Image (spheres, helix red, strand yellow):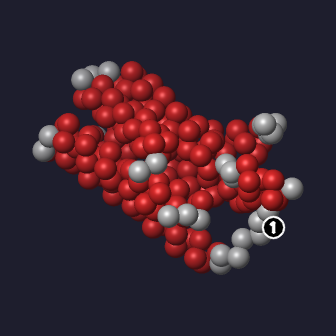
Amino acid sequence: MSETNFKLDVMPFIIATAGEFLALHYWLTYQDLGYFILANIILWAGFLTERIAVITWIQRVYRPKEGVASETTSVAKKAVGLVIVTLTEIVIWIVWLWLADEVDFWLAGAVLMVLMLAEHSMEMALLKRDSFWKYVVDVRTIFFTLMEVAGGIGWLYLVREGEPIWGAIVLILGLSIEHILQGRQLRPEPSQRMAAA
C-alpha cells in the first residue's frame, strides 16, 4: 500500500467535503430565510469548489499513477464538463428539497437516491473513463451514494425538527463517508499502477 501524502491525498478530500457541506448547509439556511439568490450562489460556489478539488486530485495524483503524463482534453471541454456535472447535482438537490417540503419527505428521499446514483455513476464513468452502466449497479457506488443520501435526509429531518446542529453533524458524517469511499474507488486499479511503474 502506498504512503498517504497530506497535500496530495488528504487536503483535496478536506476541501471537497468542506465545500459540499458548507454549500448545502448555507444553501438551506438562506433558502429558508427567503434569500433565494444568495442561497443558490452559495450552492454553486461550494459545489464548484468540490469539483475543482476532485479534478485537481485526479489530475495530480491518480492520472500519474495510471501512467497518464498529461491530459489531452482541452480547458474549454473540461470547463463545460465541470459546469454540467455541477449543474446536475445542484438541480438534484433543489428538486429533492422541493419534493421534501411540498410533496412527501420520504418520496423525496427515494427520488434523491435514484437521481444521486445516476449522477455519481456518470461522474465515476467520466473520471474512470468507463461505462455509466458499470457504476449504476456497482455495490460500492450504490453504498457511497446511500451514505450521502442518508446524510442529506437525516440533515433535513433534524433541521426541520429544530435540531440544526445535529443535522449538520449527520450531513458532515454522510458526506465524509461518501468522499472517503468514492476517493478509494477512484484510485487506479493495481494493474493500472503496475503498468505505470
Percent x, y for residue 127?
A: 59, 60
Percent x, y for residue 31?
A: 30, 45
User: In the image, is 128 to the left or to the right of 119?
Assistant: right
Please give the count of numbered marks on the rendered protein. 1
Question: Mark 1 falls on what kind of element?
Answer: loop
Residue 82 to residue 4: above or below: below
Residue furthest right as drawn: 197
Percent x, y for residue 62?
A: 72, 54
Residue 75 to residue 194: above or below: below
Residue 94 to residue 101: above or below: below
User: In the image, is 84 to the left or to the right of 101?
Assistant: right
User: In the image, is 55 to the left or to the right of 109?
Assistant: right
User: In the image, is 51 to the left or to the right of 150?
Assistant: right
Can residue 54 be seen in this snapshot?
yes
Can residue 44 be seen in this snapshot?
no
Q: Residues within 10 Å of mark 1 (few under 14, many from 20)?
A: few
Residue for badge 1: 69
Residue furthest left as drawn: 103
Q: Amino acid at mark 1?
A: Ala
Residue name at image x 52 percent, y 61 percent? 125
Asked whether 128 or 139 is in front, the reply is: 139
Percent x, y for residue 153?
A: 31, 34
Q: The N terminus lies in which quarter of the figure?
A: top right
Residue name at image x 74 percent, y 54 percent? 191
Q: The C terminus lies in which quarter of the figure?
A: bottom right
Residue 117 to residue 168: above or below: below
Q: Quadrant of residue 37?
A: bottom left
Residue name at image x 30 percent, y 46 percent? 112
